[in-house]
Image (tube, helix red, strand yellow):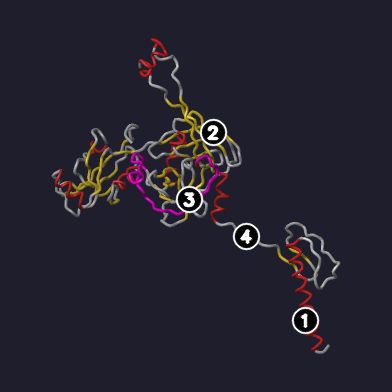
Amino acid sequence: MNQAAKQWIGLATALAIGGGCGWFAHQYSGGGVRAQGGLPAATVIPRLEANPAAVETNLVAVPKPIPVASNFIAVAVQQVGPAVVRIDAVRSLSGLHPDTFNNPFFRHFFGHQGAPQEMPEQVEQGTGSGFIVSTSGHILTNAHVVDGARTVQVTLRDGRTFEGQVVGVDSVTDVAAVKVKADSLPAVRLGNSLKLSPGQWAIAIGNPLGLDNTVTAGIISATGRTSNQVGIPDKRVQFIQTDAAINPGNSGGPLLNDRGEVIGMNTAIRANAQGLGFAIPIETAKRIADQLFATGQVQHPYLGIQMLELTRDSINTLNQSQGLKLPLNQQGVVILRVLEGSPAALAGLAVGDVIVSINGTAITTPTDVQTRVETSQIGKGLPIQISRNGKTATLAVKPAMLPPDLP
C-alpha cells in the first residue's frame, strides 16, 4: 500500500470515530434522535438504559458523566442532620398568687370564700433543639430548653417521635441531658474546640422559630468569650462566638466544623446585636452531660471570692480607695471580697490578696481563676500562690461544692 493510500485510510477512520463519538454523545443527552452523517439516515439507536456505566460500541466507550460534588457544608449536613432533633417541652407556670383572691375585685366574683380550692394553671410550651451523642438515645440540649418541663417530646428528622426523659439539668453551664428509649439511632461525631481559631468555618443546625432542620453557616468569630461579655454572668462557660445565624429555637443544637464534627452547643444570642451567636464548647458540654447521665446532677467546686483583674487604672483606683499599696506592674487578680465560711475564708485568703498562680499556672484574669477552680476536685487541696503586702505565700484551698443559691 502506497503512502497516499495509508493517509486516506487514516483520515477516513478518524472521521468515522469522530462522527460516532459526537452522535453517541448527542444520543445520550438527547435520548433518541436520528443519526446524522456517517450512519444511514433511517438508522435509530435504541434509548440507553438509565445511568449506564459506559456505552460500548465498536467505535468507542463513553464513560458515565461524573456528578457534581457537593460542597463541604452539604456533606456535613448530610452526615449530622439525622442526629439533630427537635425538642418540644411543656412546663407549668404558677398561677395567680393566693393573696390575689383577697383583692376586693376578685372577692366580688368569688364571694367571701377567698381563693378557690384549685389554682388556675398556666402552661408554657417551647421548642428547642438537641443532638444525639449515642446510638442508645443519649441527647444533649440546653438546660433552659427543658428546665421545669412536664413533658418532653423528641422528634427526629425522619419523623420518628419519642418521649424523652430529662435525666438532669445544670443551670450553671446551661447543659441538660435527655434520654429516649431507642436503639440504633444516628449519632453525631464530636470534634475538638480547644484548637479553634477565628476565621474557621462554622455550621449551625437546629429548629429556629419552628422551622425544622434549618442550616446556617459562617465563621468562628472569637473564642474564650466570658459569661460577662456574653451578658449572662451567672454561667460558668467560656463561649465560642460565631456569626452563623442563630435564632430562638436553635438553642441546644450543634455547632459544626467543616468536617461535620460537633465543636459546640448553640445557646445564646445578643438581643442588641446582629450576627453574634454563642455556643458552649463541646468539651464543657460533654463533661457536664457525662455527670448528668451518671448521677443526675453536677457538682461545681467553688472558693467563695469576688475578684478584679489588675490593670494600671484598677491598681490606681484600689490604692486610692482601699488604701492598698499594689505596685503598678503587679500581675494577677485581686480579691475584693471573701464570703464568710467559704473555702477561701477557711484557707486564710483575705481582701487585698493578689492571686498570682493556681496549681502552678499563672493567673491574669478572673476567668483564669474560674477555669482552674472548675477543673479542680472538691475537697482536695488546690495550691494558690498569692502576693500579700509585697510578700509571696502559697495556701492550700479545698474547694467545696457550689451552693445551689450561689451561682
Residue type at the position of mark 3: Gly
Q: Which residues are magenta?
A: 209-236
Sequence-wise, the earlier of marks 4 and 2 is 4
* Quadrant in which the N terminus is drawn: bottom right
Residue type at the position of mark 4: Val
Q: At x 65% / y 59%, what residue is drawn?
A: 67
Q: Are marks 4 and 3 in contact (CB under 8 Å)?
A: no
Residue type at the position of mark 1: Leu
Q: Residues within 10 Å of mark 2 (few under 14, many from 20)?
A: some
Residue type at the position of mark 2: Gln
Secondary structure beneath dot 4 equals loop
Asked if residue 395 lies left or right of residue 152, the reply is left
- Which label sits on residue 191? 3
Q: Position of residue 4 (x, y in %)?
A: 80, 88
Sequence-wise, the earlier of marks 1 and 4 is 1
Spatial CA span between label 3 and label 1: 61 Å
Quarter location, residue 266: top left
Spatial CA span between label 1 and label 4: 36 Å
Vertical comparison of 47 with 322: above or below: below
Q: Are marks 2 and 3 in contact (CB under 8 Å)?
A: no
Vertical comparison of 4 with 370: above or below: below
Secondary structure beneath dot 1 equals helix
- Which label sits on residue 11? 1
List the residue tagged with mark 2: 153
Disc 1 vs disc 2: which is toward the camera?
1
Disc 2 vs disc 3: which is toward the camera?
2
Spatial CA span between label 2 and label 3: 27 Å
Vertical comparison of 85 with 258: above or below: above
Q: At x 22% / y 39%, what residue is drawn?
A: 337
